[in-house]
Image (spheres, rainbow, N blue to C red):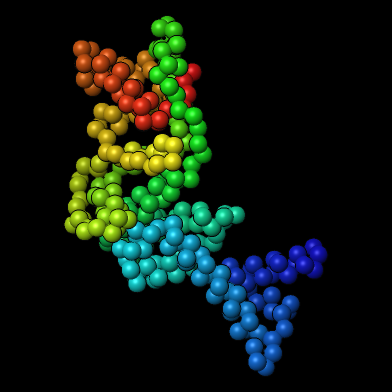
Amino acid sequence: MSNLAGVQVDFQAYLLRGSEAVAAHVMGSARVPLETRLGIYAGAYRSRLAEALAANYPALAKLLDADFDALASEYVRTHDSPFFSIRHYGDELARLLEAHEDYAAAPVLSQLARWEWAMTHVFDAADAPPLTHATLARVPPEQWAQLRFQWHPSVQRLALNWNVPQLWQALTDDTERPPTAFSHTPTQWLLWRQELTSYFRSLPPTEAALLDAARSGWPFGELCALLCDELGDAQAPVQAATLLRGWVDSGLISGAA
């Protein structure tokens, strides 16, 4: 290992784990002792990660206000940044909120973190051209039963017991916050991006089940059979056509084969 590489490894070990090996490469002075000089870099590193966490979770940061500093410090202390870009830092925050004794008693916080992280993925996801009705119309009737759909990279699904989408919207728009509300039956949510705009909406149970099956690779014939089990043979065809048209109109589907 070259001398420069050795310095870099020791410096990283100091920032991440407090290793003292880097001290052999750094000179202090009477004006700026060794500990102070190294501490400047360590403090800047932790502060930058805390800033990235607040940027990735702006609604949660606004909700917690000054208490977010303590949460950020705990997350930075226990989670290194494994990504080349700190835009992705914070992927484990919801799990920390679920498990940490200081936050587990308020599960709305972890669900809000899950929501914000999902919205980040919606915004950052790769683009893909949407499937058109004209393309679907060219599919031969005999191929429809085995037709499988490819989904836009931005599509996300969440099941939430708390009204965090409404809370997030109020925090984002700086409007009056609704009282937190819990439901034993989770609400199913769909999140996606169409062109440059992010969208979300709640899903009826039947649509949620069908969408999840379709995203798991079920062919269209099996999706229709699932609808027949749910709604009966008379209603299933119309509902299948209605849902598929809505998904295509929203840009959720990027291909079919």
**Image location of residue 53, percent across then percent down:** 45, 61
Q: Looking at the image, which is closer to me, 173 or 73?
A: 173
- Identify the image quadrant of residue 38: bottom right
Q: Is residue 225 left or right of residue 72?
A: left
Confirm whether residue 46 shows in the render.
yes
Confirm whether residue 219 shows in the render.
no
The answer to whether residue 51 is above or below residue 114 is below
Q: Is residue 239 left or right of residue 192?
A: left
**Image location of residue 43, percent across then percent down:** 54, 75
Q: How many marks?
A: 0
Residue in the picture at 60% in, 84% down = 36
Q: Looking at the image, which is closer to me, 206 or 21?
A: 206
**Image location of residue 191, percent across then percent down:** 36, 40
The answer to whether residue 102 is above or below residue 251 is below
Q: Is residue 112 left or right of residue 128?
A: left
- Outermost residue on the right side: it is 2
- Outermost residue on the front side: it is 196
Residue in the picture at 41% in, 13% down = 137
Residue in the picture at 45% in, 28% down = 130
Name the image quarter holding the N terminus: bottom right
Residue in the picture at 21% in, 59% down = 176
- Outermost residue on the bottom side: it is 30
